[in-house]
Amino acid sequence: MTNAGRRTTTRRNGLARLLSAVGVLATAMPAGAQRVPVFDVTPSCRHAAERAHPIGSVENCIKLEQEARARLVKQWSTFAPADKSHCLGLSTLGGEPTYSELLTCLEMARDARNAANGKDRGTTGQGRR
């Protein structure tokens, strides 16, 4: 087989694996998931701490992620099933999901919907009081 033929075969195999992984994610995350997912945030926190050296720490990152998960648990039932499905898909797409990323996505989707429906007319940056 020529080098060009090997590259084409390698690309096809890579694409097949990618499509397979996307299919698995799609079936593993039904719309309106019943519970907050369980993520291993250690790899993401390790990378974040490395990038934030010398002030970043894996332990602090994990603590913040645990706090974000606790907020997700409290608010999970208030998020729309379609938003849960969408945000779960986005958060796992990069390979190292985090609770803070999932929470941010869900809050933004909810707040955008509320703003579009006229439910939240506050000034940007003031927050809820």
Image: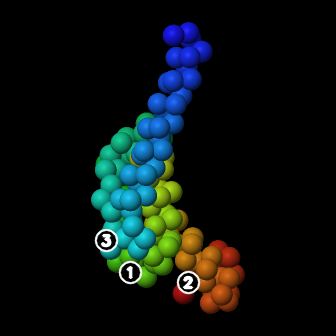
Residue 121, position as x, y percentages in the image: 68, 87
**In the image, is residue 18 above or below residue 102?**
above
**Residue type at numbered disc 1:** Ser
Residue 83, position as x, y percentages in the image: 50, 71
Q: Report helix, strand or loop for mark 1.
A: helix
The picture quadrant where one finds residue 72 is bottom left
Q: CA distance from mark 1 to mark 2?
A: 20 Å
Residue tagged 2: 128
In which quadrant is the C terminus drawn? bottom right
Q: CA distance from mark 3 to mark 1?
A: 9 Å
Q: Earlier in the sequence, mark 1 or mark 2?
A: 1
Q: In the current view of this chain or complex, which residue is farthest to the bottom? A: 119
Q: Residue at x 51, y 65 (%)?
A: 86
**In the image, is residue 89 above or below residue 21?**
below
Q: Residue at x 58, y 77 (%)?
A: 111
**Residue type at numbered disc 2:** Arg
From the viewer's perspective, tell me whether residue 43 is left or right of residue 129: left
**In the image, is residue 85 above or below residue 92?**
below
Residue tagged 1: 77
Q: Earlier in the sequence, mark 2 or mark 3?
A: 3
Residue tagged 3: 35
